[in-house]
Image: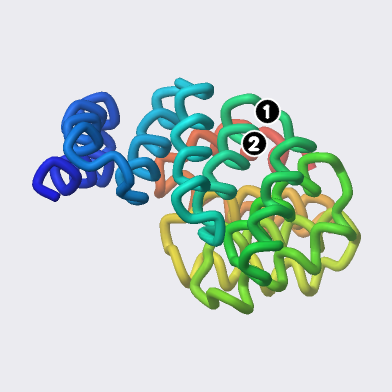
C-alpha cells in the first residue's frame, strides 16, 4: 500500500512517469490489487503509452469484470490518444453494460458523437451525464454545444451559463457561446465573451476578436 499510495500521489499531481516506478513496485509485492493496475493504466495513458495502458486496464478487468473503470480507461485511450471515436464508443458502451447511466461513459459517448457531427444523438447521453453529476462542467459545455449545433440557442445558452457558473475560468463555454452570439449577429454579447476570455488570457481571444470586428 505504501508503494501504491506513492504512485497514486504522483498521478494526482500529474507526475505520470514518476508514478510508474512505485506502482510497479506495488505490483511486484501484490499482483492482484485492482487499483494498482488502474493507476498504472492511467499513468501509461497520460504518457501516450497506449498499448501498456490498454494491457493494464485489461488486467484490471480480469481481477474485477464488474468494474466499469477499466472500460472507461480504454475508451479514453482510443478517444484522446488514438483519436478513434468509434472504438472509444464501443468501450464506453461496455462500461454502461456494467454500470448503466455511468456519467463518464455517457459523457464520453456524447463527446464522440459531437465530434462526429451527430449532435442530436449526443444530447440524451450528455443529459444523462449531467443528471448523474449536476456539477459536471465539461458535460454542460458539450450539451450546450450540441444544442448550439442543432439550432436550439436558448438551451445552448442555458448550458453554457451553467458551465461558467460551475467553473468561472472555463474557456470552452465562452468560446462556443461567442460563436453562437456571432451567428445571432449579437455583437454586444459576442464582445462580452471575448472580453471575458481576454481576462482569462485565453488562446481564443485574438481569433474571436477578429470575428467580432468583422461583424
- Residue 150, by quadrant, is bottom right
Q: Are marks 2 and 1 in contact (CB under 8 Å)?
A: yes
> Which residue is depicted at the point 51% across and 59% down?
67
The residue pinned by badge 2 equals 79
Instruction: Give the class, few, some or many, for how many residues have Cα within 10 Å of label 1's Cα (few <14, many ≥20).
Output: few
Q: Is residue 190 visible?
A: no
Label 1 secondary element? loop
Up the image or down, 126 lies above or below 51; here it is: below
Q: Describe the colour scheme in one phrase.
A: rainbow
Foreground: 141 or 17? 17
Label 2 secondary element? helix
Q: x, y (%) of residue 91?
A: 68, 45
Foreground: 129 or 206? 129
Q: x, y (%) of residue 215?
A: 79, 43
Up the image or down, 14 lies above or below 21; here it is: below
In the picture, measured across the screen, residue 29 lies left or right of residue 78, that is left
The residue pinned by badge 1 equals 83
Amino acid at each position: 500500500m505504501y508503494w501504491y499510495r506513492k504512485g497514486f500521489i504522483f498521478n494526482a499531481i500529474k507526475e505520470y512517469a514518476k508514478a510508474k516506478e512505485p506502482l510497479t513496485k506495488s505490483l511486484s509485492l501484490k499482483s492482484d490489487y485492482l487499483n494498482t493496475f488502474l493507476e498504472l493504466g492511467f499513468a501509461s495513458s497520460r504518457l501516450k503509452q497506449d498499448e501498456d495502458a490498454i494491457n493494464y486496464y485489461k488486467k484490471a478487468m480480469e481481477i474485477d469484470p464488474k468494474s466499469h473503470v477499466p472500460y472507461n480507461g480504454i475508451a479514453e485511450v482510443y478517444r484522446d490518444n488514438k483519436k478513434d471515436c468509434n472504438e472509444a464508443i464501443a468501450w464506453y458502451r461496455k462500461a454502461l453494460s456494467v454500470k448503466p447511466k455511468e456519467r463518464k461513459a455517457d459523457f464520453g459517448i456524447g463527446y464522440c458523437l459531437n465530434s462526429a457531427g451527430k449532435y442530436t444523438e449526443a444530447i440524451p447521453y450528455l443529459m444523462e451525464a449531467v443528471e448523474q453529476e449536476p456539477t459536471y462542467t465539461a458535460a454542460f459545455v458539450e450539451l450546450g454545444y450540441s444544442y448550439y449545433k442543432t439550432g436550439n440557442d436558448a438551451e445552448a445558452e442555458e448550458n453554457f451559463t451553467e458551465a461558467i457558473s460551475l467553473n468561472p475560468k472555463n474557456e470552452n463555454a465562452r468560446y462556443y457561446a461567442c460563436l453562437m452570439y456571432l451567428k445571432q449577429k449579437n455583437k454586444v454579447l459576442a464582445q462580452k465573451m471575448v472580453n471575458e476570455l481576454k481576462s482569462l488570457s485565453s488562446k481564443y481571444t485574438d481569433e474571436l476578436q477578429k470575428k467580432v470586428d468583422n461583424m
